[in-house]
């Protein structure tokens, strides 16, 4: 069993008692390529060196102080590692750090760029965040059509209570568009969703 999976089990309490400290330990083993290689040699574990999911989860644990002391610089480090490997959740989480100035100088333009990158990769939370940025002009030039587009994408991809909130925001944005703009953006959303199953 890979160390990242053990981290997931302890994080969620699946088959074991929930224990964030142990989850952080196992995520750190899977996240660090040098430690993973050493453990593979020493005990014959089969684990992907530098597992991007473990890196993302470890970053989350540092960002929120789960099983480890809250430490935004470590969250930034692990999110960057995972984002560099194409993990769009890590890219979204990096955007959150930059948006809020956690462990970095607050930078709305950088947050917007990260959210746009993650949203373009299919992350619904990032789509809602960049939609909000376009709506308010935070980090990007204000653009109601772009705001509607990304909120509509998010509304289709999200679930639970967040989906209802995002749909309400999308509907409010729709009222700001002309009939022609709305029709074009709805078609754009349909095309995007079809090409990003």
Image: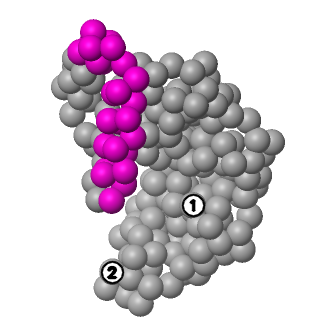
Residues in magenta, as a range? 161-185
Residue plotted at (46% across, 22% down): 144
**Residue behind mark 1:** 60
* Residue 134: percent from left, percent from top: 53, 27
Residue plotted at (61% across, 47% down): 96
Residue 46 magenta: no
In-front residue for pair 45/19: 19
Residue 184 magenta: yes
Number of residues whose C-alpha sits closer than 10 Å to that of mark 1, classed few (under 14), some (14–19) or many (20 or more) = many
In-front residue for pair 177/57: 177
Q: Residue furthest right?
A: 105
Total marks in image: 2
Q: Quadrant of residue 157?
A: top left
Per the model, the C-alpha gap separating discs 1 and 2 is 19 Å
Secondary element type, mark 1: helix
Characterize the magenta stretch by its predominant secondary structure. helix
Q: Is residue 135 above or below residue 37?
A: above
User: Are dots 1 and 2 in contact, CB under 8 Å?
Assistant: no
Residue plotted at (31% across, 85% down): 15
Q: Is residue 150 above or below residue 23?
A: above
In-front residue for pair 86/92: 92
**Residue behind mark 2:** 14
What's the mark number on residue 41?
none
Residue plotted at (41% across, 70% down): 8
Sequence-earlier tag: 1 or 2? 2
Q: Is residue 136 above or below residue 179?
A: below
């Amino acid at each position: 069993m890979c160390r990242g999976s053990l981290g997931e089990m302890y994080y969620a309490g699946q088959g074991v008692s929930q224990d964030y400290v142990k989850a952080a330990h196992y995520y750190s083993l899977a996240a660090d390529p040098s430690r993973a290689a050493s453990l593979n040699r020493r005990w014959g574990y089969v684990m992907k060196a530098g597992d991007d999911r473990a890196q993302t989860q470890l970053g989350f644990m540092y960002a929120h102080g789960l099983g480890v002391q809250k430490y935004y610089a470590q969250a930034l480090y692990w999110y960057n590692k995972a984002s560099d490997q194409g993990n769009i959740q890590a890219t979204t989480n990096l955007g959150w750090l930059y948006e809020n100035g956690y462990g970095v100088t607050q930078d709305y333009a950088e947050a917007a760029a990260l959210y746009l990158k993650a949203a373009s990769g299919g992350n619904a939370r990032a789509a809602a965040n960049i939609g909000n940025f376009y709506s308010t002009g935070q980090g990007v030039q204000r653009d109601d059509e772009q705001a509607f587009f990304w909120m509509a994408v998010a509304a289709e991809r999200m679930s639970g209570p967040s989906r209802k909130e995002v749909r309400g925001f999308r509907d409010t944005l729709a009222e700001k568009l002309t009939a022609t703009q709305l029709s074009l953006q709805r078609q754009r959303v349909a095309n995007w969703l079809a090409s990003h199953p």
